[in-house]
Image (cartoon, rainbow, N blue to C red):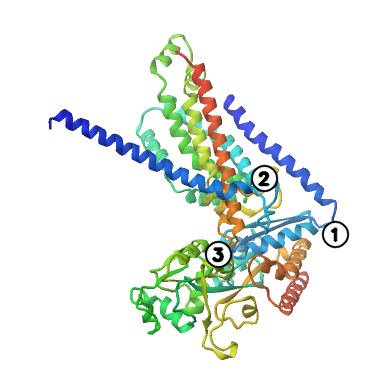
Amino acid sequence: MRIIKIATLFVGSALMFSACGGSKDSKSEGNTDTENLVGEIKIDGSSTVYPISEAVAEEFKVGYPDVKVTIGLSGTGGGFKKFGRGETDINDASRPITKKEDSLCKASNITSLEMKVAFDGMAVVVNPQNTWVNDITVTELKKIWEPEAQGKIKFWNQIRPEWPKEEIHLFGAGVESGTYDYFTEAIVGKSHSSRGDYTASEDDNVLVQGISTDKLALGFFGIAYFEENKDKLKVVPVDDQNDENGKGPILPSIETVKNKTYSPLSRPLFIYVNSTAAKRKEVQAFVDFYLTNGGALSQEVGYISMTDEEYKAEKSKFDEFVKSLSK
Amino acid sequence: MNSSKKNRLKDNAFKYFGIGCTTFGLAMLAIFIGNILIEGFARIDWDFITNFPSRNPDKAGILPALIGTLWIMGLTAIISIPLGISAAIYLEEYGKKSRLANVLEINISNLAGVPSIIYGLLGLEIFGRIMGMGGSLLAGASTLSLLILPIIIVSTREALKAVPKSIKEASFAMGASKWQTISYQLLPASFGGIITGIILALSRAVGETAPLIVIGALAYVPFVPSSPTDEFSVLPIQIFNWISRPQKGFAINAASAIIVLLMVTFVLNGIAMYLRNKWQKKVQW
């Protein structure tokens, strides 16, 4: 029938396009001389870690054109659900695996290995027109964000008496994000617990927009979003009141995150590899590649690399893991 | 003021209210499209269409997502159109009026309003896990077919209902069987309405993100899907991914990808309009 003809036309055009794409692929194959690994690697998980994995996969493809690496965006929790069922090989995570998720893995006979791949700093920012805030302590941040502050801490001078008696407008990550979990853990002391009366968004660009147009705003998000919008925001140095890791208020930067003086608002980002997958040659090559080039690539996409020693340590951890599997 | 004057005044008031509403809608659309065009038009070139995703916004392209979207559209059409039209014909022409039929009818209309993420969860369990399709194009297309089936069924039934009864009766009077009447008279006569419903439904399917993310559609696919069992990405997921990135370049890419997605839907609507006009000229009583 005619309708079916139209339908086949759609699919036909899709096939035609894919044929064009295919020929382009085979061209890039010619100029590589690395060992010819073939296979598929399935990655899923955190959208925070996604840009790093994307960059690594992109570079990996140059050397290993026949290994198909795919990456999903199910979020850390959603990704672990699939990982625990053995549906994916690697999970991107912006927080460590929970006990519940780990028992899910055990139920399907999977052991997982956690590897740190980079750091993400969280910046506390205010509007550039805000002249009074030049630094802030963790205690003050806690006073602002803890659940008890809801409806009570409304003015800047309630936090520090010399600040003006003007309203404070709060912006932060949405409660479903790993960023929120981490911030509350570091500041309030308990993960997933904070006041609820603030402007929340899962999209950090929305927070940037909000803070840059509101003189009385205070908020937090990933350091990369500050770096891209430096002219519209003012970053506040944070004092963790612990002189052992740097005295006084400290600005978030590549240096201070890397040498751990910007504390407590910097967090490690992880990948988890599945024990069944880690037996496969292509997965081993990929993880190796990740730990060798992940530092430079994470820097490129806006995160902070670990030190060379730390990458080496993660690498030997992985080698041990692979060795233990072949026994 | 007499009552006829009052009525005229009301008439005028409503007219201007109507004009106001229409302009508001159009102005919003114009601002949105204008904004997107200004931001993204310059970025669209052949490389953007034929490149794979990349960490570098200037090198990133939409090829796998665009092809994924075309695949999804084609497969969804193949699955949902025959099912939807057949179901509608049965319900409209063969099904007897009974209490069960009533319940069925209400439920089909209700299904059209179920949030799309629910279909995603259903699709993940049934197509992805039980039937073992995983995160393939087929699983995605099956899920989206479920999502748009109610829309197709309802609009096809409306189109069939709109065919004058006299046509049907004349056909029977000539000795045509039920199926002959349906295939030679009813379907051609209602084709315009049916195709409009189908295209609207497909346009909705093309723009869906949530159910596809749930069933496991990907964001980074470094190859072009070449069979229905391949994993895939689609344009809305690519846009969603780009819009949340910190670098300004990705925001521009997102705007450009939105333009491409809009073009896909415009082309789809154009085809629908063309077919409808062609058919309307053919069918004359």
| Front position in the image: B25 or A187 | B25
Image spot of residue B161 (x, y percent)? 40, 25
Mark 2 Cα-neighbour bin, 10 Å: few <14, some 14–19, many ≥20 = few
Mark 2 or 3: the one toward you? 2
Query: Of tags 1 and 2, which is closer to the observer?
Result: 2
Q: For mark 1, what is the residue?
A: A35
- Name the subunit of mark 1: A
Both on one chain, marks 2 and 3?
no
The numbered mark, 1 or 3, whose residue comes first in the sequence reads 1
Whether residue B245 is visible to the viewer of this picture, yes or no, is yes
Answer with left or right where residue A147 lies relative to residue B205: left
Q: Amino acid at mark 2?
A: Asp
Vertical relation: B110 (above or below) A283: above
Q: Position of residue A210 (x, y in %)?
A: 45, 64
**Mark 2 = which residue?**
B45
Disc 1 marks a residue whose amino acid type is Glu
Residue hosting label 3: A77
> In x, y percent, where is residue A156?
38, 78
